[in-house]
Image: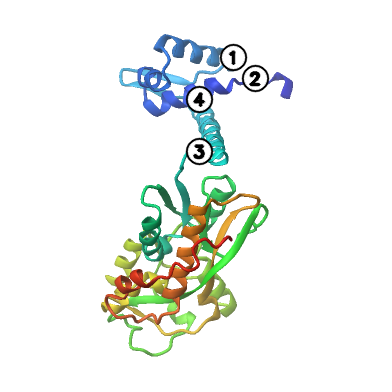
Amino acid sequence: MRDLLPKIDPRKLLYLAAIIDHGSLKGAARALEVTQPALSRSIKRLETELGVKVFERNSKGVLPTAMGEILYCHARLIRDEISLAERELLNAWGNAPIAVRVGSLPSLASSILPLALKRWEELYPNREVQIVESPQIDLLVGVLRREFDFVIGFTECYDLEDGLRQRVLFRDQLLVIARNGHPLSDGREVDWPTLVSYPWVFPTARRSHAILDAALRAARVPPPENVTVCGSVTLLKSVVSNSDHLAVLPAHAVQEELAGGRLCNLSIEDAALHRNIALFFREGHQLDQASRDLIAIVESVGQRICQSRPELRPGLYENMSQDVSLASVGHNP
């Protein structure tokens, strides 16, 4: 059966991807720096070789067929791999500064990373950094696919340890948060059966909340039935502050809201509400000095913030951003 499959020219797939991205042969030809007739002939040959139609043409441009969509998915992967190869070569040659690509949990990107970046940019004012916020599972897959130089996540790897190295940076405390005036905000200690009887907000629908799952499994309590999903930490906090929804967030991600009285921390003791935040990078990957410096600053900022009490005075962030020591900068993970 394999011998009957036609051979696919990767260059034609790249042409296909460009046409779909631009929505027309004219726009794709301009981007690819080829003539439109040459591009059209290449796609016709692709269709002839595969025996399928990859585009439907109309007055507004071109639209991929079902077969075209399948090929487009693989064409994008090929294009991404070529870009990654080019980037790896530039990095190996060391003759061109390239952007540091970081993957981060959304809760870290809303608090610790901005402080760290402020200090890092003082050392590297002309160096570009790209930060992507994603759930843990997407971060780990991304670093394995070389989409990131490194990621900052928690030490729950979802069986993806092969090919990864990790180093713990700091210890993170999670809080069950609610609005001030919530029925459970009277200061009494609560338990998980009581908490799950209320509606909850989760940060992603891709996977359930790993920390909350662990706590509920240990307590033998079923998960909450009423769940709202918010992809943004800012939106999540807004939903909690304006309803009876509950959520689990790191203490550092709600410092300002706790200090300002917009949110409160419900009293519950559970070992599952403590986690290690770690650096993850590919086995054998050599981090450059700029990356190592950024990691060292993130570690220092995280340790300082997470050693503080959840109920912090207003203005602490501004003061702390000036106090972060750079003594560990240059530490090689």
Q: Amino acid at mark 1?
A: Glu
Residue 331, how many percent across, how many down? 55, 63
Comparing labels 4 and 1, the label whose residue is closer to the camera: 4
Residue 197, how many percent across, how many down? 43, 76
Q: Circle 4 — which element? A: helix
Q: Are marks 4 and 1 in contact (CB under 8 Å)?
A: no
- Which part of the image, by quadrant, shows the C terminus? bottom right
**Residue of label 2:** 7
Outermost residue to the bottom: 188
Report the front residue among 288 and 54: 288
Gap in angstroms between the C-alphas marked 1 and 2: 8 Å
Gap in angstroms between the C-alphas marked 2 and 4: 15 Å
Gap in angstroms between the C-alphas marked 3 and 2: 37 Å
Query: N-terminal of the two: label 3 or label 1?
Result: 1
Residue 271, quarter of the rendered image: bottom right
Judge left or right: residue 242 versus residue 107: left
**Residue of label 3:** 95
As drawn, 124 above or below 296: above
Judge left or right: residue 121 versus residue 222: left
In the picture, the disc for residue 49 is 1
Residue 165, how many percent across, how many down? 63, 58
Query: N-terminal of the two: label 4 or label 3?
Result: 4
In the picture, the disc for residue 14 is 4
Q: Amino acid at mark 3?
A: Asn
Gap in angstroms between the C-alphas marked 3 and 1: 42 Å
Q: Are marks 1 and 2 in contact (CB under 8 Å)?
A: yes
Q: Circle 1 — which element? A: helix
Q: Residues within 10 Å of mark 3 (few under 14, many from 20)?
A: few
